[in-house]
Image (spheres, helix red, strand yellow):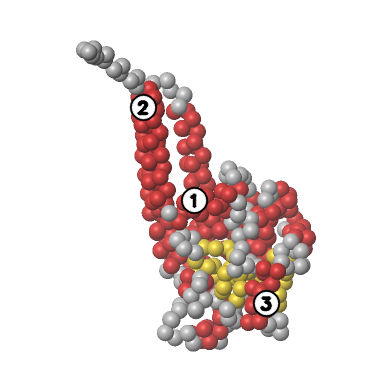
């Protein structure tokens, strides 16, 4: 899904350039109108697909009843599939002051006598890839942005050890033990997809096997930093691979393939009430996203107000068209009038 979207966008720019090479203005306008309508149709189709994809993710929400929060205790008494390991990453083993508090909150609710905490540094992360996934090391070292290495590492370390991964800007509001009953879980983000800042899985889960296998084929640039990271290693990459996995599982169930229903392939989605800012959430979100640059801020601003953005673009196009038309149409000279004195 990610590749097709980027293919369409990149080729739209090419077609725009090709259209401007035509000499007849009327032909250029007609072709640009056709391209504009194609982009609108493509966007509507993609939003329809996103709605269907989100419905699939919501169907996998973990059970929660706000009227009965004791459900957490019931869940924690079941078999634990995910090992009691919390993985986190940073450049060095000295945390910045802003992230000491979230780190300490998770330590408070998930104490060291019950959990293993591992803070991976850039050095130990690379050593891990070199020792256990050496064929991926050239890709790992070749990433243009360090955040891509950080993203890729979390999939490999969860695939190898299992456990829970948390970004350092994620704090804990309670014991994470109830989540260990899942075979794998991701956190739902709004409006679409899942996040990669909170994830958990049992060792060798097939979803993460698919993630690590797909990293190399997705290692190419998509223009600026933000789309490159999001689609090659970031949340959009995870969302696309997860949806592919879930759809193949559903297809297998319809076709009567028994192995698709194997318990190891089960995936749970944390609803926003357990991941966001609600009082029932397991997590608290602190200031983060340090890798975001200007293009990320632009994309996020557009995503928050898509209708306003579309209206702004249409008004800009209309204004530019009017200005060009007025400049190209010669003004009629005023007729001279004789004035009798």
Up/down of 12 relative to 191, above or below: above
Nearest to viewer (mark 1 / mark 2): 2
Q: Residues within 10 Å of mark 1 (few under 14, many from 20)?
A: some
Image coords of residue 274 (percent x, y): 50, 74
State which tag comes first along the sequence, 3 or 1: 1
Question: What residue is at 46 percent from the left and 24 percent from the top?
Answer: 21
Question: What residue is at 38 percent from the left and 54 percent from the top?
Answer: 48
Residue 152 lies left or right of residue 134; in this view the side is: left
* Secondary element type, mark 3: helix
Up/down of 57 relative to 325, above or below: below
Up/down of 175 relative to 335, above or below: below
* Secondary element type, mark 2: helix
Nearest to viewer (mark 3 / mark 1): 3
The answer to whether residue 298 shows anywhere in this view is yes
Residue 318 lies left or right of residue 242; in this view the side is: left
Residue of label 3: 104
Looking at this view, is 11 or 95 the one in front?
A: 95
Residue of label 2: 325
Asked whether the residues under the numbered discs 3 and 2 touch, taking CB atoms below 8 Å apart as contact, a structural biologist would say no
Label 3 – label 2 distance at C-alpha: 63 Å
Q: Say the numbered circle drawn on residue 295.
A: none
Residue of label 1: 1
Question: What residue is at 49 percent from the left and 64 percent from the top?
Answer: 189
């Amino acid at each position: 899904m990610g590749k097709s979207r980027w293919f369409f966008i990149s080729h739209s720019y090419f077609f725009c350039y090709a259209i401007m090479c035509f000499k007849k203005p009327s032909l250029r306008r007609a072709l640009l109108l056709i391209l504009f309508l194609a982009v609108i149709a493509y966007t509507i189709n993609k939003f329809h697909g996103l709605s269907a994809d989100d419905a699939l993710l919501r169907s996998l929400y973990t059970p929660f009843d706000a009227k009965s929060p004791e459900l957490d205790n019931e869940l924690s008494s079941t078999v634990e599939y995910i090992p009691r390991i919390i993985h986190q990453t940073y450049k060095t083993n000295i945390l910045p002051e802003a992230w000491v508090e979230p780190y300490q909150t998770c330590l408070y609710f998930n104490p060291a006598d019950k959990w293993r905490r591992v803070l991976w540094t850039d050095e130990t992360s690379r050593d891990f890839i070199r020792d256990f996934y050496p064929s991926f090391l050239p890709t790992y070292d070749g990433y243009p942005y360090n955040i891509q290495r950080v993203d890729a590492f979390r999939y490999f370390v969860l695939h190898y050890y299992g456990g829970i991964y948390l970004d350092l800007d994620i704090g804990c509001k309670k014991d994470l033990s109830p989540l260990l009953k899942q075979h794998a879980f991701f956190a739902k983000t709004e409006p679409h997809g899942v996040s990669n800042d909170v994830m958990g899985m049992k060792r060798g889960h097939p979803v993460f096997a698919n993630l690590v296998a797909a990293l190399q084929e997705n290692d190419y640039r998509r223009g600026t930093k933000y789309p490159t990271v999001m689609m090659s290693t970031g949340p959009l990459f995870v969302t696309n691979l997860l949806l592919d996995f879930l759809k193949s599982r559903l297809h297998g169930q319809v076709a009567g393939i028994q192995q698709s229903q194997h318990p190891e392939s089960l995936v749970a989605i944390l609803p926003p009430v357990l991941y966001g800012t609600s009082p029932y959430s397991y997590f608290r979100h602190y200031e983060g996203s340090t890798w975001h640059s200007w293009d990320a801020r632009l994309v996020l601003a557009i995503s928050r107000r898509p209708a306003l953005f579309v209206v702004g673009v249409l008004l800009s196009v209309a204004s530019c068209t009017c200005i060009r038309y007025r400049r190209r149409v010669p003004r009629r000279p005023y007729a001279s009038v004789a004035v009798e004195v």
